[in-house]
Structures are given as C-alpha cells and as structure tokens.
Amino acid sequence: MKLWGGRFTKETNEMVHHFNASISYDSRFYSQDIMGSIAHVTMLAKSGILTDGEKELIIDGLKGIEDDITSGSLPIDMESEDIHSFIEAELINRIGDAGKKLHTGRSRNDQVALDMKLYIREEIGNIDFLLKKIIITLHELMKAHTQTYLPGFTHLQKAQPVTLAHHLGAYVEMFKRDRSRLSDIYKRMNLCPLGSGALAGTTYPLDRDYTAELLGFDGPTLNSMDSVSDRDYLIELLSALSTIMIHLSRFSEEIIIWNSNEYQFIELDDGYSTGSSIMPQKKNPDIAELVRGKTGRVYGALIALLTTMKSLPLAYNKDMQEDKEGTFDAIDTVKTSLSLFDGMVSTLKVNKSKMAYSAKNGFTNATDAADYLVQKGIPFRDAHSIIGQIILYCIDKNISLEDMKLEEYKEYSPVFEADIYDAISLEACVNKRNTIGAPGLEAINKVIEINEAYINSSK
Ligand code: ARG
C-alpha cells in the first residue's frame, strides 16, 4: 500500500519504485519505528488528539506487529516502499480505522529522523561495550607484561627499549578516547526531532517535551527545518568510527609485523589464523589484514555522507535517504572488527625472549650509554659521538654494547667503569624512565592503577 496514492492517476514505474524504496535496509530499525510510534500516540492521547481507546488499540496493534516481525511470523514485505509504510499498512490491516490515525501530526521526515537517532543511540551503546571489552583485555595483558622488554621504534627503526605493557598502554589510551568521542556524540545528538512534521511543525497541539521524555531524550529539537535535515551526528559518528578503525588498523599492522617470521615477537593462535592452499608452511594473519583492509570502507561511508550532504538546501531532500546503507555498513564493520580483534589479542602468545633479544641487539640502550658518560662529566654532544664510534665498532664485530669488555670501552674514554653494565641493561634503561607516562615499572604501575579505576567507574 502506498501512503501517498491520492493525487496520482498512474502506477509508479517499477524501476522508479525500486530506485526510490528503502525497505531493504531501513527494515533493520522496525523496532525503533514502533517505539517512536508508541510514544507518538501516547502523546497524542495525552494531548486530547486521540481517545484513550484509540491509543490502546494502536499500541496493542503495534506491539503485536513487533512481536510477529521478531519471531519471524510476519515477514517484512520487500515490495513496500519503506519500513514506515509497511508497519502503518499492517496496522490498518489489523485494527482498521484507528490505525489510520497513527500518522496524525507526523511526517515520515521527522519519523525517519527519529528512528535513525534511536537506532544510533543503541549502536553507540553496543560499540562502547566492545571498546570497553578490548580495554579490559589490554589492561590484563598490561598487568602481565610490565617487565616484558621489547624495542620501541621510531621510523620502524629500533629506538629505545620499552615494555609490552607500555606499548599496549598506548592503544588503551586510544580506545579510551574513542569511548569518550562516542559519549560526546551521544550527548549532542540526544534531542528529539519528532513533532517537526515535514519541515514546519504541525497545527496540532503536540506536547513535544512529553514525547522527548518518553523516548529518553534530553528535550525536543528547537528548529523543525533543522530537525528533519540534520545529519551532523551521523557524520560525527562516521568520523569517530573511522578513528576507531585507524586505531585497529595500526594495531593490526603491528600484529602482522610482530607475527612475521623475521620478528617472531608473537604467535597468533591457530583459531585466529588461516592457511594457504598451496604453501603448506603458511599460517597467515588474515584477521589482522582484513581489519586493516576494512578501514577503507568505513572511511568511504564518511566521505560518501559528507559529499551527499554538501549543498543540500533546507529542509528534507531525498538525497538524505543515502545516509543509511553506508552508516549501517560502517557500524557492522566496526562491531565485527572490534569483536574479532579482542579474540585475536587475548589468544596470542607472547615470545618474551625474542622481544628482549631484539631490544638488546639493536643498540636501543645507546641513549642510556651516552647519558652514562654525561653523568661522568662528559658534555652530551661528545658523549653522543663517543657512543656512535663504539656502535660502529660493535657493528663491525657483530656484538652488542653489553658484550663489550671494559678494556674495550676504556679505549674510547677513560671514564668508563664497571658500572656501565648496570647503566645499560634493558631493565635499567626502562626502569629509570619513571615520570608518569613513561615505561618504567613505577610509572606504568601508576597508570595501571588509574586504568583500573577507569574500568571500574565507567559503565
Ligand atoms: N525513506 C526515507 C528516508 O530514509 C523516509 C523519509 C521519506 N520522506 C519523504 N518525503 N519521501 O529518508
């Protein structure tokens, strides 16, 4: 059934019908559509626009439809134009004339704006839950690896030693920011558009504050033209989702590198790896690669919506229907990526000795060796140069700084003493760095404590 057949004398061209229809994707928010309709008729009855009897009939009818769609006994008719028309037609089918009053004082423009907000609010909660789960997984790993040493890199060149706890802690901070971004978006979007009508409000004495309250909004939106055409919150959401994907993608890249034969810092669990059809020795990090690869489609959804919204005049335009598929796809992609990522990280095996060996054999303690000379009274620039020459010597002999004999050190500077070995051990290099945010044991334990409180306090 069409909601708008009255002024037409001809059937819609079939291709036009399908091009125009959105049921194939907006059917996913049927329960939000029904929730909004129940709040709407509750308000209509309170405002004296519907009788209590009509309200009860409509609400019972809507609840029955929701139950039947959920249980599968009422298949959604994919020939309908959209989920709003499908539900309204089904309601009229079931309860007759009272059903025809559901759409009083409402347009599909404010209806769809509401449905999408209700849907997004719920998905923000789901994504937030998954982010928190990853944070907890990483937090547990941090606690277990405060003394697991590995090289820290800049330019993907070994730089200074850090610990695995410190390295993972960087991602904990990223995911904490992701959660706070989502909560900002939630706060800003949480105003109810229902009652804005097609664009200019309605002539009925709607109680918009009441509808907003019934649906858990902080209040009604304040401009009906903006209400039906605002898609800012979706752009903000897609930007936040893109940022989550950046974080997952960077982490994936590291996992791929760490899991490689050359590094062997970690080994992915068999359950999270895949094989090759031709090379029997292969165990590939496909999950990490796919998460990295899927980042592109989430960015794509953001760019697509930015482009769709550009230059649209006020108020509603059908272009805006294009907000849905990309957003839904981005949400699904982020949720799957977060869940799989959590499983992959919590099951991977850490190869502590490979990490430590790599940190030891890449001169990551060179800065500390230079600092040692500074402590003995040598200006930093000279110290830098002396250690540089020593490193050349070590490279030539294929040894590390720890392998140098004291006599060999003394050839470069008489100030070297036996305490050089303590000064440049991995443990010393890391644990001397104890300002908050640094990898030293004392500093990282403080951060772990802060994160513990964060996890316990945030819902
Ligand atoms: N399917 C439409 C959308 O997603 C619903 C609003 C239709 N409004 C209209 N004036 N045709 O935007």
Image (tube, rainbow, N blue to C red):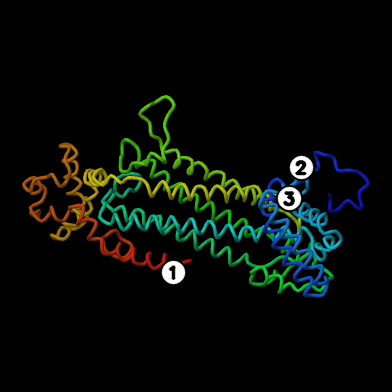
User: In the visual, does 80 lie left or right of 180?
Assistant: right
Mark 2: few/some/many CA within 10 Å (<14, 14-19, 20+): few
Instruction: Give the Cα separation between the discs numbered 2 and 3.
Output: 12 Å
Q: Secondary structure at mark 3?
A: helix
Q: Secondary structure at mark 1?
A: helix
Give residue 278's position: percent from left, percent from top: 42, 24
Which residue is denoted by mark 3 in the rendering?
A: 319
Q: Secondary structure at mark 2?
A: helix
Which residue is denoted by mark 2 in the rendering?
A: 19
Tell me the amino acid under the disc marked 3: Asp
Give residue 299's position: percent from left, percent from top: 56, 47
Tags 2 and 3 touching, CB below 8 Å: no
Give residue 21's position: percent from left, percent from top: 76, 46
Tell me the amino acid under the disc marked 1: Ser
Q: Is residue 265 above or below residue 110?
A: above
| Number of numbered discs visible in the structure rendering | 3
What's the residue at 69%, 52% (across, down)?
69
What's the residue at 73%, 56% (across, down)?
65
Q: Is residue 347 above or below residue 458?
A: above
Find residue 444 and report its image quarter. bottom left
Give residue 236's position: percent from left, percent from top: 59, 58
Asked if residue 382 can be seen in this view, the reply is no
Disc nearer the start of the sequence (2/3):
2
Disc nearer the start of the sequence (2/1):
2
Which residue is denoted by mark 1 in the rendering?
A: 457
Mark 1: few/some/many CA within 10 Å (<14, 14-19, 20+): few
* Tag nearer the camera, 2 or 1: 1
Instruction: Give the Cα separation between the discs numbered 2 and 1.
Output: 48 Å
Tell me the amino acid under the disc marked 2: Phe
Q: Is mark 2 within 8 Å of ligand 1?
A: no
What's the residue at 71%, 74% (across, down)?
210
